[in-house]
């Protein structure tokens, strides 16, 4: 067993605390998973839950695989698929893995032939699930990703995706106008990020550890988060990009190189902050995009046309069986790791401190303030104070500002009442 780290200890404690509740919603699981899961043992349990799949071990699907409009394209893509962790695999193992991947995709395309269209890159996403899960479970995970997260990629054409790609530059314009101008002067359009967003970076990132971390994040967030992550990655490397010669070829090569050595955790923080400040509907309205029914992700998690979706997924609750399974898994983690199995002995002083701490009521920290605090720490250690990214944590986003924004109507009513009171008396 690998040595347990502080992240894993924290996750186990948070999950156990969560499981003591009578009802657990999908949103609560997302809050834990968005910060990253320690290993694939957790992903085997939590990824199906993040995708709203109940009792995945008992699920079956009777869809028959037949020839469909994209059969040949799927086969060509699958035949070229090389798993990043396949070092030492025999040709027989690679062939069997590809056969499983082919069946997963073919089954999805046959089941939703009237509404979903295959695109090159979808096989990369499915292959990530097949790395951790077996064929049967990978099918259900891939199916729900196609329905809930990648539906817009699987429209009849890429018109919606092209509009979404413009979100990247719209976000950059808000934060760093100079960088936006540099990219425009280099005649660099957003096509360079197509493979990033369509494959959740699984096509361009070489390390599986980073790919799994990104999938933890994307599965826990809005379907358009890959576009926000792309903008965050570019903003994070703005100095490096602007050192390039302002030509399309040089800037393109520079942008493509950004994925080779990503600081995933820092970029995730920036992406989450961008999503808070400029939600998809807001940024698309600002871009004067006419949002039609084809823009499924904008209306997430309400996806029209699929009756099987349970009350927009937010009301999805963890079943008793799933809770018991999770608790059993966490208990096994405890038994395998002595540091979690028992508490260290305490002296009188430490017992008193622990008692006082338990008596204290901790005030919950809002997600906005928590991200601001983390970003402030990252920016202070890596950038100069005049760096454009500091606009994300400017004083106007302090707790006073957030309180005023949240309770502005109540405050306004209170002021009116005071004014009337003093006027009458």
Image (tube, rainbow, N blue to C red):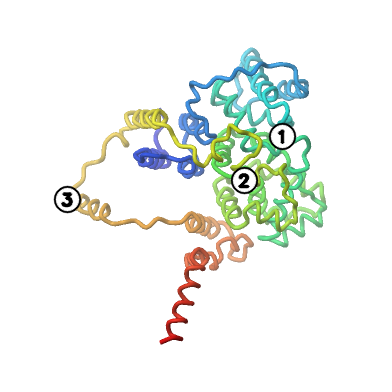
297 with respect to 137 (left or right): right
Give the structural element (helix, strand or loop) at label 3: helix
Q: Residue at x 47, y 26 (%)?
A: 55
Crowding at mark 1 (Cα within 10 Å: few <14, some 14-19, many 20+):
many
Please identify the residue farthest to the top as the structure is shown: 92
**Residue under numbered circle 2:** 225
What residue do we see at 62% from left, 53% from top?
279
- N-term mark: 2 or 3: 2
Determine the residue positioned at 54% across, 34% down: 51
Q: Nearer the viewer, residue 325 or 75?
A: 325
Q: Earlier in the sequence, mark 1 or mark 2?
A: 1
Please give the residue where the numbered disc 1 appears in the rendered image: 154
* In front of the other: 73 or 203: 73
Total numbered circles: 3
As measured in the structure, the alpha-carbon distance from the residue carrying label 3 to the one carrying label 1 is: 63 Å
- Kindly indicate whether the residue at mark 1 contacts the one at mark 3 (C-beta within 8 angstroms): no
Mark 2 crowd level (few <14, some 14–19, many ≥20, 10 Å Cα): many
Closer to the eye: label 1 or 2: 1
């Amino acid at each position: 067993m690998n040595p347990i780290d502080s992240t894993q200890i924290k996750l186990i404690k948070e999950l156990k605390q969560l499981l003591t509740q009578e009802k657990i919603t999908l949103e609560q699981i997302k809050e834990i998973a968005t910060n990253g899961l320690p290993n694939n043992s957790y992903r085997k349990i939590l990824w199906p839950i993040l995708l709203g799949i109940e009792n995945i071990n008992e699920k079956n699907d009777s869809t028959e695989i037949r020839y469909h409009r994209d059969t040949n394209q799927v086969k060509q893509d699958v035949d070229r698929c090389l798993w990043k962790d396949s070092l030492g695999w025999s040709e027989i193992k690679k062939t069997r893995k590809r056969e499983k991947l082919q069946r997963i995709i073919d089954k999805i395309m046959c089941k939703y032939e009237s509404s979903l269209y295959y695109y090159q890159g979808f096989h990369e996403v499915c292959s990530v699930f097949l790395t951790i899960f077996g064929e049967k479970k990978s099918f259900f995970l891939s199916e729900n990703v196609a329905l809930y997260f990648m539906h817009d990629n699987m429209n009849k054409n890429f018109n919606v995706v092209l509009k979404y790609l413009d979100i990247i530059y719209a976000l950059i314009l808000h934060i760093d106008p100079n960088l936006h101008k540099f990219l425009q002067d280099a005649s660099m359009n957003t096509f360079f990020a197509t493979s990033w967003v369509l494959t959740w970076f699984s096509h361009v990132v070489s390390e599986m550890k980073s790919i799994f971390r990104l999938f933890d994040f994307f599965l826990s967030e809005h379907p358009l988060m890959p576009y926000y992550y792309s903008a965050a990655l570019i903003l994070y490397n703005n100095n490096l990009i602007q050192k390039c010669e302002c030509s399309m070829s040089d800037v393109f090569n520079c942008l493509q190189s950004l994925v080779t050595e990503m600081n995933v955790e820092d970029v995730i923080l920036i992406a989450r902050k961008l999503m808070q400040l400029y939600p998809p509907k807001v940024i698309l309205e600002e871009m004067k995009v006419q949002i039609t029914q084809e823009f499924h992700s904008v209306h997430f998690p309400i996806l029209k046309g699929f009756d099987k979706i349970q009350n927009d997924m937010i009301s999805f609750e963890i079943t008793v069986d799933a809770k018991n399974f999770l608790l059993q898994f966490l208990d096994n983690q405890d038994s395998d790791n002595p540091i979690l199995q028992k508490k260290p002995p305490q002296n009188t002083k430490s017992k008193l401190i622990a008692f006082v701490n338990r008596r204290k009521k901790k005030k919950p920290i809002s997600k906005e303030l928590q991200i601001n605090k983390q970003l402030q720490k990252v920016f202070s250690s890596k950038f100069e104070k005049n760096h454009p990214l500091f606009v994300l944590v400017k004083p106007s986003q302090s707790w006073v500002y957030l309180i005023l924004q949240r309770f502005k109507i109540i405050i306004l009513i209170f002021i009116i009442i005071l004014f009337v009171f003093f006027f009458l008396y």
